[in-house]
Amino acid sequence: FNKKIKKYDNQLKVETGPAFRFQNIHQKKRRSKIKLKNILLCLPMHLKDATDIFNLAYESKLDLSYNFIVKTHPLLDKKKIQDLILISNDKKFIFSDENLYDLFDNSEYIITSASSVCLEAISFGLKVIIAGSRTNITKNNLKDIVEEYDWKVCYNSEDMLEFINKNINKVDYDILSFFNSVNRENVNNFLSK
């Protein structure tokens, strides 16, 4: 990350701290190599971005063997989403309250917007589809960090179908390159700054 952050100013002092929010990711089990036909829709708290994600999935021309599993942001509930984003009521969308990491284990792809969940999904071996905004700036926190064949910004269903059909084997990433361990040394370093 330091390289990406220092892209415009090499003299910039950059410090990283322990990944408190992601401390359990280091104990996660590796995904099985079984090909699953689940596409996880990880919704952000912003309804406009969530709408873009639903539109992308809804318009997809994937065969019916694919399941769209929906995980809402902790600040949103299913009823609010279904009241405000009408296509989310379509039978092709299955809402789940399962733990995020369990959903990762049972999915092959994730559709989301720029979020830390992108890096979490990559570390679980999922391919990441970032729903490109049709009306606003598209945020992409994977560029220059993760190999480009493990993610794609998709603005329409054709982009998504092309990415899924490419099906290039992914790289196994070292989780520690994304998230600093929460241990005594890292915590003490962080607190002493």
Image (cartoon, rainbow, N blue to C red):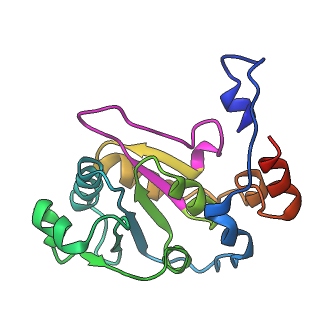
Which residue appears at 73% of the width and 57% of the height? Answer: 173
Above or below: residue 25 compared with residue 19: below
Q: Image quarter for residue 76?
A: bottom left
| x and y, in percent, of residue 45 in the image | 33, 56
In the shown orientation, is residue 16 left or right of residue 108? right
Number of callouts in the render? 0
Q: Image quarter for residue 94?
A: bottom left
| x and y, in percent, of residue 8 in the image | 66, 17
Q: Magenta includes 129?
A: yes
Above or below: residue 100 compared with residue 113: below
| x and y, in percent, of residue 114 in the image | 45, 46
| x and y, in percent, of residue 73 in the image | 36, 64
Which residue appears at 48% of the width and 51% of the height? Answer: 115
Looking at the rendering, the stretch of residues picked out in magenta corresponds to 127-149
> Main SS type for the magenta part?
loop
Q: Is the N terminus in the top left, top right, bottom left or bottom right quadrant? A: top right
Observer-nearest residue: 111 or 80?
Answer: 80
Which residue appears at 10% of the width and 66% of the height? Answer: 83
Which residue appears at 29% of the width and 51% of the height? Answer: 46
In the shown orientation, is residue 52 left or right of residue 113? left
Above or below: residue 35 compared with residue 45: below
